[in-house]
Amino acid sequence: MDRLKKPFLTVVSVQAIYAGMFLLSKAAFNGGMNNFVFVFYRQAAATVFLIPLSLFIEWKTAPPLSFVTFCKIFMLSLFGITLSLDLYGIALIYTSATLAAATTNCLPVITFFLAVLLGMEALKLRTIPGFAKLVGILICGGGAATLAFYNGPHFKVPCHIHIFYLHNSHEVEVHSPNSGKTWIKGCFLMLTSNICWGLWLVLQARVLKSYPSKLLFTTLQCFMSTVQSFVIAIVLVRDPHEWALGWNLKLLAVAYCGIVVTGVSFYLQAWVIEKKGPVFLAMSTPLTLIFTMISSVFLLCEIITLGRIFGGLLLIAGLYSVLWGKSKEQKILEEMSSLPKTRAEKFATVTPSSPLFV
């Protein structure tokens, strides 16, 4: 039971951390911070935080880093972190916070199909667990679509304290008559960002097999992403004032996203991927939206709609459907591994339509 609780509690913690990142980064962007500079600063903060920890904890036990593995980590950092974060930030500016949170919940669908295409996840519809995983994926997609395209009645929760002032950007962007082209562009960029992120989740599992030191692996990714994001930012942002940081919300957002999000959560994600696989982690993504909606209502005094509530419930239902399917198939594999060899061989001859095959 503890083996199941640990990964579940870890992914819940990861998604709570991401909810905090969403609120702080949105506030920083609305406060005038440049997205490319923000990504560089957060990656630099994460690298500075992680280097001494990784050298102290894993340096002596780390396996040798081959050139091929180094190149793989470099590409993972480029597409999964640097480009994904840059594209996500631009899309967040072009669209609304609600759509950004909603389309991020398409990540489980993207990750699932990428994992199937790469042979890292099985899907056999003739089995109950396999069918449950497919239904869960479809329900998650329906929940994300509901959040994106349906509002319904509005509910205003009494709130008198504004922690962050966000200028009501969602209402301005949605109803602006000239926002059609930027809205489509933002949706495309958000989808591209999620594809990069999903590919990063899937491919990490393979790279970790050749380089199992998770903390050093995370540190290397952060360091490479820092260099990559600096090159992008220095080319695109020439105004020195855009790089200035003070004792304000921008510094808080950079410190939180760099140390807590990139430093702590990336390590936790690598641990979950190694233990339970990339789809297990990706299916917990809807929790970020739930946490963000609740925090936005009470901390940002935002208006909640029926569409957000209904979409959130669909995402939770889809999440547990997939997790149920994966836990069932894991239980079956454990039962087969505990059987005597002759009996296990007998099970191995069962036809593919058997519920034992997922």
Image (cartoon, grey):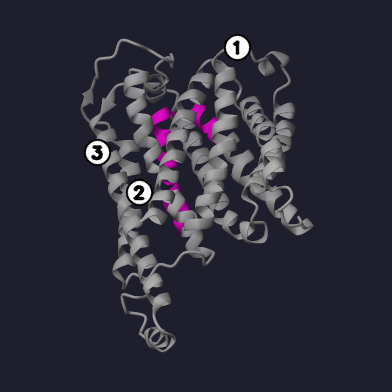
The numbered mark at residue 310 is: 3
Q: Is residue 136 left or right of residue 282?
A: left
Q: Is residue 44 left or right of residue 87?
A: right
Query: What residue is disc 2 on?
Result: 141
Q: Residue 59 or 183: which is nearer the viewer?
A: 59
- Label 2 to label 3, Cα distance in Å? 13 Å
Can residue 94 be found in the magenta stretch?
yes
Q: Residues within 10 Å of mark 1 (few under 14, many from 20)?
A: few
The stretch of residues the image draws in magenta is: 88-112
Q: Quadrant of residue 266?
A: top right
Which label sits in the foreground, 3 or 1?
1
Q: Position of residue 284 (x, y in %)?
A: 40, 46
The numbered mark at residue 247 is: 1
Label 1: which secondary element:
loop
Q: Residue 251 or 96: which is nearer the viewer?
A: 251
Label 3: which secondary element:
helix
Q: Is residue 145 shown above or below 21?
A: below
Three-letter amino acid code at the position of disc 3: Phe
